[in-house]
Image (tube, helix red, strand yellow):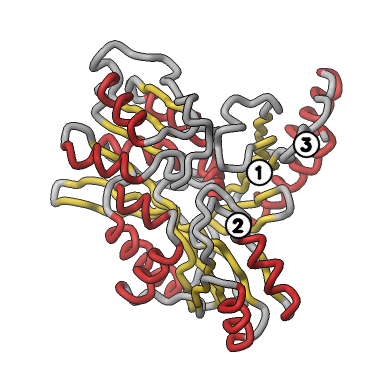
Amino acid sequence: MTDTTDSDTAPEPTAPPASGAAEVMLLGAGQRSGELAQAFRHLGVEVTTVGGYADADTVVALVETANPRYLVADAGSVPTDALVALAERGDVEVFPTPRAVRLSLDKEGLRRLAADELGLPTAPFWFAGSVEELTAIARHAGFPLTVTPVAAAPGEGQSVLLRPDDVEPAWQRAVAGGPLSLKRVLAETVVEVDVEVTMLTVRTSGPAGPEVVFCEPIGHQAGERTLEAWQPQQLAPSALDAAKSIAARIVNSMGGRGVFSVELLVRGDEVYFSDVRPYPQDSGLVTLRSQRLSEFELHARAILGLPVDTIMISPGAVEVGYAEPAADGAEPDPAQRRLVLADALAVAESDVRLFPDSSPDSATSDAPRWRSLATATAPDPIVARDRVRRVATALRRLG
């Protein structure tokens, strides 16, 4: 893995603890890591956070200094060899497991595990190591095709091919030199589906050994700078059984404890495996309102070996507004913000979170930065989605 920062500027713990004081060391930057740190602290656990990208030697040195019991990593923020070295020492539990991290960053390895070893249903797929190979695949498979780097942050370098002229630009976009670029791509047939679903799957420890439990299915759809998600997404009984079976098999293969975000494509009774991330994802933010325990609280509890429950207390929806890659411009004055919030919060059972443009860690996280979260609950997900759209429409007046 290529270091994404100057090697002379290694990250430091945000609050260096006394030896043995920190039970959890959290490697990662960005807003999701902040939510997870809060979830651990609410359980009385002291957390040392390390922002930015850390090379293997730096990670090992930090662990030796802080002496945590658990090392919890954002899969994109630390090289796998550091996790392997620390896991082999046996004096610190590492989450996700090195195997899970490696697979989550390697679409080729993950897809071959899912389709070839586990026999999970997937969309037809191929791998290409050159523009010529990708051209031959497109000629054989036809259009449309999606093209994604085999190793990249979610959404990075992805294209949809509609005609032969799209092949070379898609190749260039996929291998343009992101920090994880391996000059190799995954090409998939576009499958017509009813809905894209996240199955939040919690792998934890029980009296008889590892246990897997599921949250209610979460439907989601992405816009240009937004993500809408809702829970529950109704599935036919046979589709729900298939979704749980697929999620359990891939999660048990990856191992470890915590929340796994299993991405599925659903068409009627047919369910296709798409991807899995061994940590909470933005589609799961709906659980901040819909479940008794959010995805972050579930992740923290499972890692610590504590009891979990995935009870949904109300149907809910969330719309995530993402900040622009460049500066977002001037923030609205406080009076304007109050007027907008008054309109947004006038929607029944709604809530909002706003995040300043100067959010810390935004430059060191590979995840899109939240600008706003609009949430709402209702007696059914259709009404919750309508409510959250009205909340989000009001928030867009903030710019």
Q: Real-space Cα distance between discs 1 and 2?
A: 11 Å
Q: Name the kind of residue labelled 3 in the image.
A: Leu
**Above-or-below relation of 21 to 138:** above
Q: Are marks 3 and 2 in contact (CB under 8 Å)?
A: no
* First of labels 1, 2 by sequence position: 2
**Above-or-below relation of 58 to 166:** above
Which numbered tag is attached to residue 320? Answer: 1
What is the secondary structure assignment of the residue under circle 3? helix
Q: How many marks?
A: 3
Q: Real-space Cα distance between discs 3 and 2?
A: 20 Å
How would you rate the neighbour count of disc 2 (Cα within 10 Å): few for under 14, some for 14-19, many for 20 or more?
Answer: many
Q: Residue furthest front?
A: 8
How would you rate the neighbour count of disc 1 (Cα within 10 Å): few for under 14, some for 14-19, many for 20 or more?
Answer: many
Q: Give the labeled residue for mark 2.
A: 220
In the image, what residue occupies the spot 45% across and 42% down?
295
* First of labels 3, 2 by sequence position: 2
Between 361 and 227, the one nearer to me in the picture: 361
Image quarter of residue 362: top right
Q: Residue furthest top?
A: 18
What is the secondary structure assignment of the residue under circle 1? strand
What is the secondary structure assignment of the residue under circle 2? strand
Q: Name the kind of residue labelled 1 in the image.
A: Val
Q: Name the kind of residue labelled 2 in the image.
A: His
Which numbered tag is attached to residue 379? Answer: none
In the image, what residue occupies the spot 67% across and 52% down?
385
**Quadrant in which the C terminus is drawn:** top right
Q: Real-space Cα distance between discs 3 and 1?
A: 11 Å
Left or right: residue 55 compared with residue 286: left
Which numbered tag is attached to residue 395? Answer: 3
Left or right: residue 305 compared with residue 134: left
